[in-house]
Image: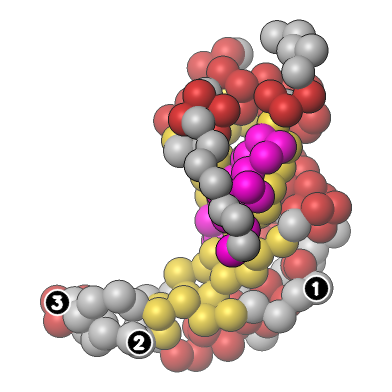
Amino acid sequence: MANSNPMREIYLDKVVVNIGIGDNDNMFQNARMLLEKITGKKPVATLSKRRRPELGIRKDQIIGAMVTLRNADARNLLKKALEANENVYKDSCISNNSLSFGVKEYIYLQGVKYDPAIGMLGMNVNAAFARKGKRVELKRIRASKVSKKHGGISKEEIKEYMQKNFGAKTGEEE
């Protein structure tokens, strides 16, 4: 799709890497160490939003760790995560201007070795996409609406972006 309008081009806005640990406090420290090792950034704790007694989780309990990456860091980590999945993702992983997939074990990431202190952990990777002009809606001073036609990114556009920039494709295309 050759657009002459530069405002219609999509770009990788951010990549969020998340490791869920449930109610295990020891695993939280391991997840934090792993995310810091992989991304070089300080992870933050994710808290439960509601009480789930059947799972032993109370409201505002730490249930995971996450890191948000932008710009070159985001592209590099997304490339590593896609290579860990052999540059293939499911078509159902695309929704709401984003691509979400999991990496079963961190040792599949290129350049990361097994650490017995951490153990074996998997992670979720969410890549969010946007168009130029998104900031107009998000800024505090003189914010304005952006049309739905401009803001929404179709599955086909995300697939094309991933193929062009990362060489990744959906598993159904094989």
Q: Which residues are magenta?
A: 121-140
Distance of label 3 from label 2 (alpha carbons): 14 Å
Identify the image quadrant of the N terminus. top right
Residue 60, label in figure? none
Distance of label 1 from label 3 (alpha carbons): 36 Å
Residue 54, label in figure? 3
Q: Residue at x 59, y 63 (%)?
A: 140
Q: Secondary structure at mark 1?
A: loop
**Disc 3 to disc 2: CB gap under 8 Å:** no
Q: Residue at x 51, y 17 (%)?
A: 172
Q: Residue at x 51, y 42 (%)?
A: 145
Front-most of residues 127 and 91:
127
Residue holding disc 2: 61
Residue holding disc 1: 40
Q: Residue at x 55, y 64 (%)?
A: 18
Residue furthest to the top: 2
Amino acid on which the number 2 mark rests in the picture: Gln
Amino acid on which the number 1 mark rests in the picture: Gly
Mark in the foreground, 3 or 2:
2
In the image, residue 34 lies in the stretch drawn in magenta: no
